[in-house]
Amino acid sequence: MENSTMAAKLLLEQLISPEQLAPMLSDPDWVVVDCRFSLGDRNLGQQQYQTAHIPGAVYADLERDLSGPVGPHGGRHPLPVIDRLVDQLGFWGIDADRWVAVYDDSQFGFAARFWWLLRYLGHDRVVLLDGGWSAWRRAGLPTTSQPSHPIVRQFVPRPRLELLASIDTIKQAQRLAEGTVIDSREPARYRGEVEPIDPVAGHIPGAINYPWVQVCDPEGRAHSIASLKSHFQDLPPNPPPIVYCGSGVTACVNLWALARAGLPQARLYAGSWSDWCSYPDLPKVTAPAE
């Protein structure tokens, strides 16, 4: 894509519409990634892709491709082994010169994980498809069941370690009473009233609740930049906020929205609550934070 004006707009908005993406399907500078997934049926996303997907799209599985091995600590969806992910990115046809459009059908819930991983590895030319798969279908745009065979390229990572926060980073922030920690889960899980997945309910002491689903409408269409700036207006930019969720996946939706709102240096606590609660000695809060 040679249009510098459009490139600047995409980098600003972190988003592309179905109508904008459609003509890019024939552009060799673009790679489309399907990230549909279901935590309740882990084969569903792959099956949906095989049934119908955007022409030319490759499929990235949350647990096979975008997560690493699970251990006693580190959370339910640890970050993938970087060397393996780098090889896979090249197999999908992604290198430093490609633009990447990512979609799912879950209000960015899985696509944002891919977006964050690329950003973490130093690749900025990545956008989310506004409205995801459903918006593409509503627009009457073409689909296919044919598998994709991209040209294999070499992806060279340039990790941005400053975009990642460890459990020790949060402990230090608590000791110094500085910095903002954002819990991205729904309010009932944040308050510890319910916990359908992890063995312990509650939230990290001092964390404030910004549910990830609030950055778009129920159909997965993103709120405007102005709306997101207003949504996050009470957050101090320094030090950059630390964001977590249950396992480091939907937190990436908030991280995407923060970047769209002008706070691109926000950090991911990848292990998230599923890591924090795996340590019996760490404090947990089961009521709204002060």
Image: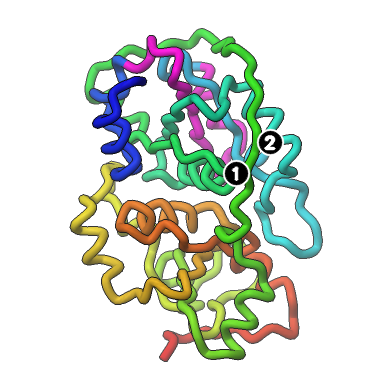
User: Which label sits on residue 121?
Assistant: 1
Asked if residue 35 is positioned above or below residue 116 in the image, the reply reads above
Q: Nearer the viewer, residue 117 or 212?
A: 117
Mark 1 element type: loop
Q: Which residue is drawn at the image coordinates 60% and 68% (left, top)? A: 273
Horizontal side of residue 128 vs 170, given as left or right:
left
Q: Quadrant of the C terminus?
A: bottom left
Q: Residue 135, can we see it?
A: no
Q: Earlier in the sequence, mark 1 or mark 2?
A: 2
x then y, percent, for residue 129: 35, 34
Question: Distance from label 1 to label 2 (Cα)?
Answer: 10 Å
Mark 2 element type: helix
Q: As shown in the figure, which amino acid type bears the numbered disc 2?
A: Leu
Foreground: disc 1 or disc 2: 1
Q: Which residue is drawn at the image coordinates 23% and 51% (left, top)? A: 223
Name the residue beneath numbered marker 2.
Answer: 85
Q: As shown in the figure, which amino acid type bears the numbered disc 1?
A: Leu
Specify start and end residues of the magenta stretch as a single range.
Answer: 24-50
Q: Which residue is drawn at the image coordinates 72% and 71% (left, top)? A: 278
46 drawn magenta: yes
Marks 1 & 2, CB-CB < 8 Å contact:
yes
